[in-house]
Image (spheres, rainbow, N blue to C red):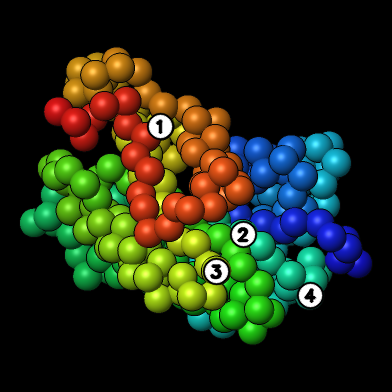
């Protein structure tokens, strides 16, 4: 049953890394949590962590490439929680491939998950909040690859740049409804999804050399930024992208 008076949040792509850290941080802040993955069995650890923090956890199967899956997941979450206050668009896929080698299938996968899925999840959240007459907050995970150019990241960077523009567009359109829309753009963060690149010979040293603070970010630092944007302390912030990159984009 929905918990009366409890704040609620939905984090997509929450089985590991940044998504799991955000879900656990919001649970510790007193939110009941909905968490999703294309493989919901992988959510067991984060669900246990949410419950250990004293919050309710709703586990959802979601493939953001599918409108049917988005509609079903949002309906399930709203039914279970009663309402939603916050949506965190974290589901995403990486792609490291030279532009000359990107195939239509590569392109479609990156755009469908990182951009299309983020837009239509946000649309469903916007519809829910407008219909309920409630204010709310959407935070999408972008990337510094959408701000600076780097070889072999074209499709991924284009999608993440579009997420930041989408953030501005939706913030303007939905401000009258009290819906704030922001994004967080992490730079280099050591996560399970980055293991493939961080393991490449020389990659870690060359990546660190481009970061003025000379270290990678942590998933907890990204979660802290999301917590801030989702909190009353950020009630006058909308249409913005908060960059966490150790100074990378300042160079």
Q: Nearer the viewer, mark 4 or mark 3?
A: 3
Query: Are discs 3 and 2 less than 8 Å apart at CB?
Result: no
Crowd band around label 2 with a 10 angstrom C-alpha radius: few (<14), some (14–19), many (20+): many
Q: Nearer the viewer, mark 1 or mark 4?
A: 4
Whether residue 79 sits left or right of residue 20 in the image: it is right
Which element type, helix, strand or loop, lies under badge 4? helix
Q: Which residue in the protein does label 1 denote?
A: 189
In this rendering, is residue 139 above or below 208? Answer: below
In this rendering, is residue 218 above or below 11? Answer: above
In percent of width and height, residue 154 lies at 18, 53
Crowd band around label 1 with a 10 angstrom C-alpha radius: few (<14), some (14–19), many (20+): many
Q: CA distance from mark 3 to mark 2?
A: 12 Å
Residue toward you, 177 or 54: 177
* Precedes in sequence: disc 1 or disc 2: 2
Q: Which residue in the protein does label 4 denote?
A: 79
Q: CA distance from mark 4 to mark 3?
A: 22 Å
Whether residue 31 sits left or right of residue 145 in the image: it is right
* Precedes in sequence: disc 4 or disc 3: 4
Q: Which residue in the protein does label 3 denote?
A: 178
Q: Nearer the viewer, mark 1 or mark 2?
A: 2
In percent of width and height, residue 97 lies at 20, 49
**Quadrant of the rendering where the N terminus is positioned:** bottom right
Q: CA distance from mark 4 to mark 2?
A: 15 Å
Q: CA distance from mark 1 to mark 2?
A: 23 Å
In this rendering, is residue 108 above or below 67? Answer: above
């Amino acid at each position: 049953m929905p918990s009366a008076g409890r704040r609620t949040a939905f984090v997509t792509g929450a089985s590991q890394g940044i998504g799991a850290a955000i879900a656990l941080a919001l649970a510790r802040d007193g939110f009941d949590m909905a968490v999703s993955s294309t493989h919901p069995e992988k959510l067991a650890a984060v669900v246990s962590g949410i419950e250990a923090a004293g919050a309710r956890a709703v586990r959802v199967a979601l493939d953001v490439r599918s409108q049917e899956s988005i509609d079903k997941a949002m309906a399930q979450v709203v039914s279970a929680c009663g309402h939603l206050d916050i949506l965190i668009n974290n589901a995403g896929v990486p792609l490291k491939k030279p532009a000359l080698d990107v195939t239509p299938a590569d392109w479609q996968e990156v755009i469908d998950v990182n951009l299309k899925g983020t837009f239509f999840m946000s649309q469903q959240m916007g519809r829910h909040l407008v219909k309920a007459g409630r204010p709310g907050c959407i935070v999408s995970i972008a990337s510094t690859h959408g701000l600076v150019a780097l070889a072999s990241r074209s499709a991924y960077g284009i999608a993440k740049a579009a997420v930041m523009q989408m953030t501005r567009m939706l913030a303007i359109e939905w401000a009258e409804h009290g819906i704030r829309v922001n994004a967080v753009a992490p730079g280099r963060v050591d996560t399970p999804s980055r293991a493939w690149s961080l393991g490449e010979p020389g990659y870690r040293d060359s990546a660190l050399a481009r970061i003025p603070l000379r270290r990678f970010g942590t998933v907890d630092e990204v979660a802290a930024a999301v917590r801030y944007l989702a909190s009353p302390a950020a009630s006058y912030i909308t249409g913005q992208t908060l960059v966490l990159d150790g100074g990378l984009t300042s160079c």
